[in-house]
Image: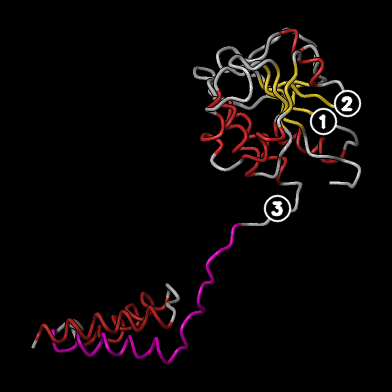
Amino acid sequence: MSAETRPPVIVLVRPQLGENIGKAARAMLNFGLTEMRIVAPRDGWPNPSAGPAAAGADVVLDRAEIFETTAEALADCTHVYASTVRKRGMTKDVVTPEQAAREIAVHPGRSAIMFGREASGLESEDVALARKLLTVPINPEFGSLNLAQAVILCAYEYSKHCDLAMPTMEDIPPPAPQDELDGLIAHLENMLEPKGYFFPEDRAEATKRTLRSVLTRPGWNSLEIRTLRGVLSSLQKCDK
C-alpha cells in the first residue's frame, strides 16, 4: 500500500438492526478498518444494540458518521464499490473482494465499499453511484450472506495489503536430542521383550526398525519424551 492511499470507508446503507451495525464494526476492526459511514439507519443513531454486538470495537462506532443520503456519504470518494450478489442490469465492471482490495491498495484517493440493508441489499439508485460491482462466487441456490459476513470478506482481503501482525503463536520447543529418543525406544523395547512382542526371532530386528521409525517420525520434544517415559514406568509398576 502506498503512502498516498487510504483504507477503504465502509458504508452501510439503510441498515436495519443495531446488532448488525455492531457486528460489522467488529469485523472491520479485526482487520484494521475504522471508518464507518451509515446512511439513514432505520432505528436512528446511536443505537443501544450496536455496542454489545461490537464486542469491544467501540472506536469504530464512536467515529461512525451518519448521512441522510448515499450520495452524501460518498461525496469525497473517488473509487466506489457496490457489494451485491444480484444481477443489476447495469453495465459496470464486476470484481471480487480480492480484486477490489488490490485496486484500493494502489489507487490514491478515498475508496468506499457499500453494503445494503439486511432484507434486500442495495437499491438500484445506490448501485448506480458505484464505479464497480463487488461480488463473490456463491451458491446460486442460497445467496444469503449477512451484513457482517459480507463486510468481513472485504476487510480480510484488504488486510492482506497492510502490515497487520499475526496473532502471537506459542513457541514450539525443538525436537529432543537423539539420546533422549534412544532412551525412550530402549525403554519400550525392554518392556516389550519379555512379553514376546519381538517374535519370531528372525523378524525381531525388522520389527525394531519399524518401531523406531514410528517413534522417530513425530519429532517429540524433551517434555513429551519425559511424559511418555513416565507413562511407560507407570505401566511397568502395574505389571508387578
Q: Main secondary structure of the magenta part?
A: helix
C-alpha distance separating marks 1 and 2? 6 Å
Answer with the quarter of the image where residue 149 lies: top right
Secondary structure state at the residue bearing disc 3: loop
C-alpha distance separating marks 2 and 3? 25 Å
What is the number of the mark on residue 78? 2
Earlier in the chain: of badge 1 and badge 2, it is 2
Residue visible at 76% across and 15% down?
A: 70
Asked if residue 236 is positioned above or below residue 25 in the image, the reply reads below
Q: Amino acid at mark 3?
A: Leu
The residue lying toward the viewer, choosing from 169 and 183, is: 169
Asked if residue 108 is positioned above or below residue 146 in the image, the reply reads below
Magenta stretch, residue numbers: 167-195
Residue found farthest to the left: 240
Confirm or deny contact between disc 1 and disc 2 (CB under 8 A): yes
Q: Which residue is mark 3?
A: 164
Answer with the quarter of the image where residue 40 lies: top right
Asked if residue 211 is positioned above or below residue 95 in the image, the reply reads below
Q: Which residue is mark 1?
A: 111
